[in-house]
């Protein structure tokens, strides 16, 4: 497709060999994942997205997403986010469905964090508002063998947190206490910290019960916005 080829060319026009060499150390892949880097920064990708997201059908974006090139996959997801945010309900549903069916290509922390709450989280909130409070997809993702599925589940709750709905964040954080992957420990601690920024007591209640069991990475991330005395207390429980 001509528009996809134009996006690919613009990404290559913005490539930086120095950043391309550095990025693999920053965006560490999982075993079996193939990731190639052009060295294009996110602001430059967002400029490209702004030019093209209205000109492309969400289905056509799959050509970009199904790429070994990291920036092509991220640009594809940013296009979907823009199409979702600016689209009618039919487009939102289409993007949500495409995202879940093709999530095996959402396979790095930045890809998840740029998209999961803005598509999956937002769609679930919208469904709740019309009386369909079925969030079973989060439970399915959270039990997946894929670290990225599990991260998508937790990251999606960021949208709930912003609506002062903390139940799923707390539920998944408890479920992830035994998860050994650092990408899950980090995102769980981060989301708990976000809960604490809006409702500190909810965070403290969780910590009072689980701090001693929490992986240290998760615990440290969750404590970042608490005062020194509180941080010292909960760290001492490990």
Image (tube, grey):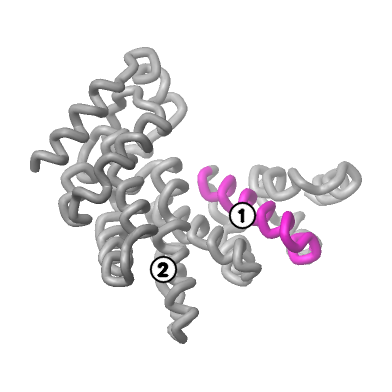
Front residue (pair 30, 36) = 36
Mark 1 surroundings: few (<14), some (14-19) or many (≥20) residues within 10 A:
many
Q: Is residue 156 visible?
A: yes
**In the rendered view, does 202 fall on the left or right side of 166?**
right
Residue 36 picture location, percent across and down: 27, 28
Residue at 48 percent of width and 72 percent of height:
125
Q: Give the number of marks.
A: 2
Magenta: main secondary structure equals helix
* Disc 1, SS: helix
Residue 191 tag number: 1
Name above or below for residue 161 compared with residue 32.
Answer: below
**Residue 11 lies in what quarter of the image?**
top left
Q: Residue furthest right?
A: 229
Q: Is residue 166 visible?
A: no
Range of magenta residues: 183-204
* Disc 2, SS: helix
Question: In which quadrant will I find the N terminus?
Answer: top left
Q: Is residue 191 magenta?
A: yes
Residue highlighted by disc 2: 123
Q: Residue furthest left?
A: 1
Q: Residue furthest top?
A: 18
The label nearer to you, 1 versus 2, is 2
Residue 191 picture location, percent across and down: 61, 54
Residue at 74 percent of width and 44 percent of height:
224
């Amino acid at each position: 497709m001509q528009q996809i080829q134009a996006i690919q060319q613009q990404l290559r026009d913005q490539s930086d060999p120095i950043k391309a060499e550095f990025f693999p150390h920053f965006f560490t892949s999982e075993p079996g994942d193939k990731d190639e880097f052009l060295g294009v920064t996110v602001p430059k990708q967002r400029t490209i997205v702004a030019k093209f997201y209205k000109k492309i059908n969400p289905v056509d974006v799959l050509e970009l997403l199904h790429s070994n090139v990291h920036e092509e996959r991220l640009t594809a997801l940013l296009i979907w986010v823009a199409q979702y945010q600016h689209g009618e309900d039919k487009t939102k549903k289409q993007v949500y469905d495409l995202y879940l069916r093709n999530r095996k290509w959402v396979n790095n922390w930045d890809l998840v964090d740029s998209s999961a709450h803005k598509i999956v989280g937002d769609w679930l909130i919208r469904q709740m508002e019309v009386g369909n409070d079925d969030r079973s997809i989060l439970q399915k993702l959270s039990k997946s063998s894929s670290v990225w599925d599990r991260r998508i589940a937790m990251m999606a709750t960021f949208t709930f947190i912003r609506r002062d709905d903390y139940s799923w964040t707390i539920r998944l954080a408890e479920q992830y206490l035994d998860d050994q992957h650092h990408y899950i420990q980090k995102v769980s601690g981060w989301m708990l910290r976000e809960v604490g920024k809006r409702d500190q007591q909810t965070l403290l209640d969780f910590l009072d019960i689980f701090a001693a069991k929490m992986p240290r990475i998760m615990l440290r991330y969750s404590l970042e916005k608490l005062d020194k005395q509180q941080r010292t207390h909960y760290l001492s429980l490990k």
